[in-house]
Image (cartoon, helix red, strand yellow):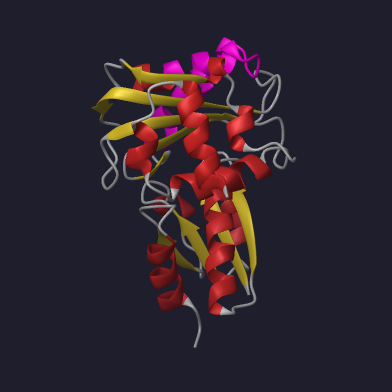
């Protein structure tokens, strides 16, 4: 629980300036990053896409920001988070917050294990998102996140 | 007072909404229980809640409840949450 968001984002979990042609492709990149860190299986990526197909683009929780996730399931191996900034914004079909420039992928094994990370995330993303989106390498991104986590 | 934050899965957006609503309520000095719920259990929980917080897409799914349903556009905007909560809180 003491881990901070920056520490949890390993290089594998970060994709900067990703090329996504549509929202599905953007969510898939976030899912692939979760899989690369050993947090999820490929099935979880499919579940995240299905969640939007079934429930709509409610995961676009703020201007420019989508929080891609599904529920705890056997496809989640451990709680994890991924960070994907997009080279070109994509439309999710959200009335107020489109287009999306940042997709945060989230996988949780239960309802509580990720609360510290979420609290960090809320703090960081309520700050200056433009600066976060300027990061060109993982080290720089983690430094910006740490700066905003204080 | 009971407030329910609702999202599709109960682990992501509703948790953020719950955290930010708690921050706002502390600032306002309001004593309330905020719970996060997924849409499946939300209808039941909303029955004895006074306020439901959710996103525009999910609001119609809550159904017919006596609680006030508040739609939040920007989950990170504490000002928006403050304004909308203030308007919905009982005098």
* Residue A19 in the image: above or below residue A117: above
* Residue B21 in the image: above or below residue A79: below
Q: Residue shown at 48%/22% (left/top)?
A: A138
For the image, the number of numbered tags is: 0
Segment colored magenta: A28-57
Does the magenta stretch mainly form a helix, a strand or a loop? helix
Figure quadrant of the N terminus of chain B: bottom right
Q: Residue shown at 46%/71% (left/top)?
A: B85
B30 with respect to A90 (left or right): right
Q: Nearer the viewer, residue B80 or A18?
A: A18
Can you tell which quarter of the image residue A10 is in?
top right
Q: What percent of the width, then of the height, locates residue A129?
A: 37, 42
Q: What percent of the width, then of the height, locates residue B45?
A: 63, 58
Can you tell which quarter of the image residue A21 is in?
top left
In the image, residue A34 lies in the stretch drawn in magenta = yes
Does any portion of residue B39 appear in the rendered image?
Answer: no
Q: Residue shown at 32%/45% (left/top)?
A: A63
Does any portion of residue A116 appear in the rendered image?
Answer: yes
Q: Nearer the viewer, residue A47 or A18?
A: A18
Q: Nearer the viewer, residue A97 or B78?
A: B78
Q: Residue shown at 56%/46% (left/top)?
A: A149
């Amino acid at each position: 629980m003491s881990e901070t968001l920056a520490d949890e984002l390993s290089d594998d979990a970060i994709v900067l300036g990703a090329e996504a042609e549509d929202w599905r492709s953007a969510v898939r990149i976030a899912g692939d990053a979760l899989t690369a860190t050993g947090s999820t299986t490929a099935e979880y990526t499919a579940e995240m896409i299905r969640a939007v197909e079934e429930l709509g683009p409610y995961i676009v929780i703020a201007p420019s920001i989508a929080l891609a996730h599904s529920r705890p399931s056997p496809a989640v191996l451990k709680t994890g988070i991924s960070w994907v900034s997009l080279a070109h914004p994509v439309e999710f079909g959200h009335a107020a917050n489109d287009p999306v420039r940042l997709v945060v992928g989230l996988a949780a094994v239960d309802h509580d294990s990720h609360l510290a990370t979420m609290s960090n995330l809320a703090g960081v993303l309520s700050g200056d998102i433009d600066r976060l989106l300027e990061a060109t390498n993982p080290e720089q991104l983690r430094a910006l996140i740490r700066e905003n986590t204080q | 007072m009971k407030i329910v934050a609702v999202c599709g899965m109960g682990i992501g957006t509703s948790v953020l909404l719950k955290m930010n609503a708690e921050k706002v309520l502390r600032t306002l000095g309001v004593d309330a229980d905020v719970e996060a719920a997924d849409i499946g259990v939300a209808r039941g929980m909303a029955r004895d809640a006074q306020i439901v917080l959710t996103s525009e897409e999910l609001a119609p799914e809550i159904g017919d409840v006596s609680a006030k349903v508040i739609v939040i556009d920007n989950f990170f905007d504490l000002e928006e949450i403050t304004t909308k909560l203030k308007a919905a809180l009982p005098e």
